[in-house]
Image (cartoon, helix red, strand yellow):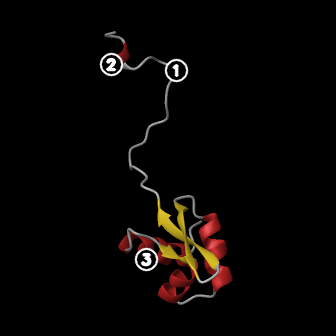
Amino acid sequence: MVSSLQTRIRATLNREPDGLTTYQLVLAVHSCPESVRKALARMGDAYVDRWVKEGTRYYQVHCLAFVPEDCPHPTTQKAEFLTDL
């Protein structure tokens, strides 16, 4: 089940293709840091794109993975384009 927090995080990351840090997400979705961290860990389409350094610390920048709507499971049959070889 997708939580409303995950839905808000997903919508926020969709608007920010360059990604956001956890703290930026906390400010954008008006939630506590621990809840945002837990929601990000449960989201299969969110990933850490890179790390940014601020002062002496590094922070994760989260982005959304592109997941196509039609992504069929591979079969054991040879693909049609391979039979012409």
Circle 2 sits on which residue? Answer: 81
Q: Is residue 63 above or below residue 85?
A: below
The residue that mark 1 highlights is: 76
Q: Please indicate whether residue 28 sits to the left or right of residue 51 in the image.
A: left
Q: Which residue is mark 3?
A: 12
Mark 3–mark 1 CB contact (< 8 Å): no
Report the amino acid beneath label 3.
Thr
List x then y, in percent, for residue 41. 64, 66
Q: CA distance from mark 3 to mark 1?
A: 39 Å
Residue placed at 51% from the left, 89% from the top? 27
Q: Which circle's residue, 1 or 2, is located before the other in the chain?
A: 1
| Sequence-wise first label, 3 or 2 | 3
- Quadrant of res 19: bottom left
In the picture, which quadrant includes the C terminus?
Answer: top left
Identify the secondary structure beneath mark 1.
loop
Label 3 Cα crowd, 10 Å radius (few <14 / some 14-19 / many 20+): some
- Mark 3 lies on a secondary structure that is helix
85 relative position to 8: left or right: left
Instruction: Say which residue appears at 48% left-offset and 75% top-offset.
Output: 20
Q: Secondary structure at mark 2?
A: helix
In the image, which is nearer the foreground, mark 3 or mark 1?
A: 3
Would residue 14 be found to the left or right of residue 34 on screen?
left
Mark-to-mark CA distance, 3 and 2 = 40 Å
Q: Earlier in the sequence, mark 3 or mark 1?
A: 3
Alpha carbon distance from label 1 to label 2: 14 Å
**Residue 64 badge:** none
- Pick the front one: 67 or 72: 67
Dot 1 amino acid type:
Thr
